[in-house]
Structures are given as C-alpha cells and as structure tokens.
C-alpha cells in the first residue's frame, strides 16, 4: 500500500529485531493460510461497493496513503487480516509504527500444560505447553491457531499444523536456541495479549507454575470469561485481580490436587469477580457460607459444598418461589457427600412428588431429565408468584441440584406448565 521511500530499510541493512519479528512471527505466516476469511462467516461485516467508494473518497484514494494522518491509517489497519498487517508492517518504518500502534482483535487465548498426548507429533507422551490464539468469537470460524512448545535439549521446539485448503495438514516445527520451553510459551502468549492491548474477551490458563513474578499482565480490562486451573489458591487470587469485577463466566479447577481436600477459602470467594458473576463452575471444594450463597448473582453455579446447610438451601429456594431469587435463574448444583435432611430442605415449600401421574403429565420430561441430569429424590416446587412456574429439586447421595424446569405457556386460550431442562 505504501510506496517506496527513504523510510524503507536499505538493502543489506539489518532490520530492527522487533520489525523482523512483526514480519515473520517466527515464520508462522502459514498458520493463517488455511483460515477462512472472517467475513465468510459474518456477512454483516462484508463491505459493499458503496462502502468502498465512501472509504476511498474519505481517505483520498490509496495513492495518498502516506498523506493520511495516523488516526485514519489506524482506522484502515484495524480491518486488515493479520497476515496483511504483517505485510504492510514491513513496507516502511511509518507503516510499521502504524501497524504496531493499532490493537489487534484477539478474542481468546488459552495456555495449558496438562495435555500430554500429541501423537501426530510424537508417539510417546512428553511435557509441553500448548498456546491457542482465537481471533474470532466463533471457534468454528477457522480464525485461530495452536502451537505446542516443548524442550529439546537446551533448546525449545515449537510445533504446529499447517492447514492448506484441499490438502492434509502438515506438521511444521522450528527451534529456538538456548531457552526454556515453559518460559517461551508464556512469553509468546503474553506477546499476543499485548497485541490487543490485553483486551481479549476470554482467557483459559491451566498451568501448575505460571510465572506470575515475570508476567507483563497488569490487567485484562475487557475480559468476560475466565477459566483457571491450578493447585494453588494464590494463583486463583492473582488472576481474579486481573479481570473486571463483573464477569459472565468464572471456572476454577483443581489440577492434580485431591478435589475432596483442596478448598477455596471464604475470603477469596467474597471477591466481586465471584459474587457478581453470571455463571461459575468450581471443580473443587468451596467454603461458601449460607449468607454468601444467598447473595450470589449467578444464574448457573456448581461447586463442592463445605459449609452450606440444609436451612441455607431451603432459604435459597424460598427466595425464588417468592420472586426474590436471582433473575433468569437456571441451575444450582451443590455437590458433597454430606447426608441431607429432606424435611429441612423442603420445610415450608409447596411441592409435588414425581409420581406416575406427574410423569404422564410432564410428557417425557422426566425421562429426558434422568438421562441428562441423573435422578435421585425429585420433587417439583411451585412459585407463589405464578403457580405455572416451578423448580425441580433433585437430591441424590452426592448432590443437591436445583433447576428451573417449569415454565408458563399459553396455547389456544389454555394456560399450562411446560417442562424443560435449562
């Protein structure tokens, strides 16, 4: 796009390290060759002829590219595919600065070290770190790539698939000299976070020893979903402090620690990132108190109980039937082997046992529920605000599960309850 000028490095001149890095990205251009164009998946983003004419008129034609101010240049660059950004970035020093200053749209980054099986690269298991970068919110858009970092003697080997249309994927690799694979994987992932000004929407980290002391991450201001796998409570705390208070989804997972022993303490659970999130899932014990349970904003939640009492669960249900529960509630899965007092759980509630008459009325719902959710002692608990709305309470040996399954429907002047799994 830019014309040759004195800004272009002279022949034989050694390019700056960061310019060379922008141009090659470790020679990963072929990562993007097989990616489907984002506009193919999102027709609303396709520019029509009128849009292109307006753009060209606004910027004075591409022959005047070098005369545009920086804001206009950045406005154009932000719509370029990543590979095209790299090509533009080596046209001139000014183009390089424009590309470098224009944040890239990165939706999600994942880093994990607990996947040992990569048989297409090696027959035996091996220690490695996988870095996945997803540029588009739709995983199936093809706008993503995955790299596998591993140790090769004193060096780091990086492996990936090269996708070529209408051909079988090819295994590709390169070697970085005299460095540690774990550190290089994290540096690479954080570099991609920097490319989008750390404004990615989703992050997944499952690592035993994330180098927090060397991290460049100050905050992830646009993050909405976070999944952290660790066996260290302080790692959970560190990551939660990097994201906004209001999140859509939080997942905290114990990796190798005993799920029946490893426990998230009550003080960490008080963090607004947990108390105010819309959905959360913890694959470990969590020391929520009854008071904390009643103040959660999550419409969907799952954790191993430590301190939740039968009375606390009863009050949680009562708030919903009285119209004071969490808006758009879906489910609450309270795991644990503690023996529950069914009379206390259902104290003061109007409910109906799942008997033969109910199963016939629900028209196949009970069978579907059992296949998907399992079935213990199930009852239907009715709302005092609208009797056509109801919850399913399913109590088994290892879980107290609460689902909003009964919904009010009207058809041909008839009002009835329709049952479905949220």
Image (cartoon, rainbow, N blue to C red):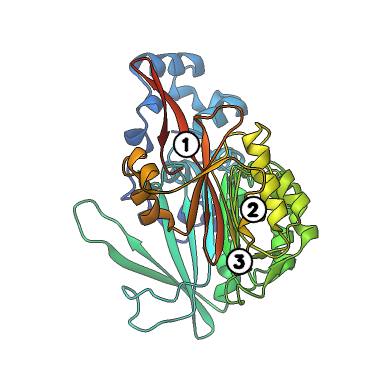
User: Closer to the N terminus: mark 2 or mark 3?
Assistant: 3
Residue displayed at 67% across by 45% down: 316
Mark 2–mark 3 Cα distance, whole angstroms, equals 15 Å
User: Closer to the N terminus: mark 1 or mark 3?
Assistant: 3
Report helix, strand or loop for mark 3: loop
**Residue matched to label 1:** 406
Nearer the observer, 189 or 157? 189
Q: Is residue 110 left or right of residue 294?
A: left
Q: Position of residue 329 (x, y in %)?
A: 57, 39
Mark 2–mark 1 Cα distance, whole angstroms, equals 19 Å
Say whether residue 153 is visible.
Answer: yes
Residue displayed at 76% across by 58% down: 268
| Residue 372 found in image quarter | bottom left
Residue displayed at 39% across by 55% down: 370
Report helix, strand or loop for mark 2: helix
Residue placed furthest toward the right? 267
Residue displayed at 22% across by 61% down: 168
Report helix, strand or loop for mark 1: strand
Mark 1–mark 3 Cα distance, whole angstroms, equals 26 Å
User: Closer to the N terminus: mark 2 or mark 1?
Assistant: 2
> Are circles 2 and 1 on residues that touch, CB within 8 Å?
no
**Residue matched to label 3:** 336
| Residue 164 found in image quarter | bottom left
């Amino acid at each position: 796009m830019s014309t040759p000028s004195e800004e272009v490095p002279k022949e034989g001149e050694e390019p700056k390290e960061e310019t060379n890095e922008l141009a090659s990205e470790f020679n990963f251009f072929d990562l993007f060759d097989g990616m489907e164009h984002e506009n193919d998946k999102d027709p609303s983003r396709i520019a029509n002829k009128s849009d292109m004419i307006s753009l060209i008129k606004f910027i004075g034609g591409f022959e005047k590219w070098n005369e545009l101010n920086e804001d206009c240049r950045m406005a154009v660059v932000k719509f370029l595919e990543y590979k095209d950004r790299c090509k533009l970035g080596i046209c001139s020093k000014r183009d390089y600065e424009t590309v470098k200053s224009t944040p890239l749209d990165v939706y999600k980054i994942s880093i994990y070290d607990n996947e040992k099986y990569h048989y297409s690269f090696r027959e035996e298991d091996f220690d490695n770190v996988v870095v996945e970068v997803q540029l588009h919110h739709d995983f199936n858009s093809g706008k993503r790539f995955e790299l596998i970092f591993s140790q090769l003697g004193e060096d780091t080997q990086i492996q990936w698939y090269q996708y070529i249309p209408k051909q079988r994927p090819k295994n590709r690799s390169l070697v970085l000299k005299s460095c540690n694979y774990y550190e290089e994987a994290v540096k690479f992932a954080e570099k991609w976070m920097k490319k989008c000004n750390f404004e990615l929407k989703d992050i997944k980290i499952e690592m035993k020893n994330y180098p927090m002391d060397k991290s460049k991450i100050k905050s992830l201001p646009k993050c909405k979903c976070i999944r952290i796998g660790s066996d260290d409570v302080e790692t959970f705390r560190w990551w939660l402090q990097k994201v906004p208070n209001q999140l859509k989804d939080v997942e905290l997972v114990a990796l190798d620690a005993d799920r029946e022993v490893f426990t998230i303490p009550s003080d960490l659970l008080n963090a607004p990132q947990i108390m105010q999130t819309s959905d959360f899932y913890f694959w470990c014990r969590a020391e929520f108190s009854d008071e904390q349970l009643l103040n959660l904003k999550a419409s969907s939640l799952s954790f191993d109980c430590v301190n939740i009492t039968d009375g606390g669960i009863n009050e949680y249900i009562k708030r919903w039937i009285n119209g004071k529960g969490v808006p758009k509630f879906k489910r609450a899965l309270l795991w644990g082997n503690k023996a529950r007092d069914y009379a206390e759980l259902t104290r003061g509630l109007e409910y109906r046992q799942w008997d033969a008459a109910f199963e016939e009325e629900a028209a196949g719902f009970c069978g579907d529920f059992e296949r998907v959710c399992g079935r213990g002692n199930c009852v239907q608990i009715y709302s005092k605000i609208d009797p056509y709305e109801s919850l399913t309470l399913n109590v088994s040996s290892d879980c107290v599960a609460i689902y909003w399954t009964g919904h009010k429907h009207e058809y041909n002047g008839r009002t009835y309850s329709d049952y479905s799994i949220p």
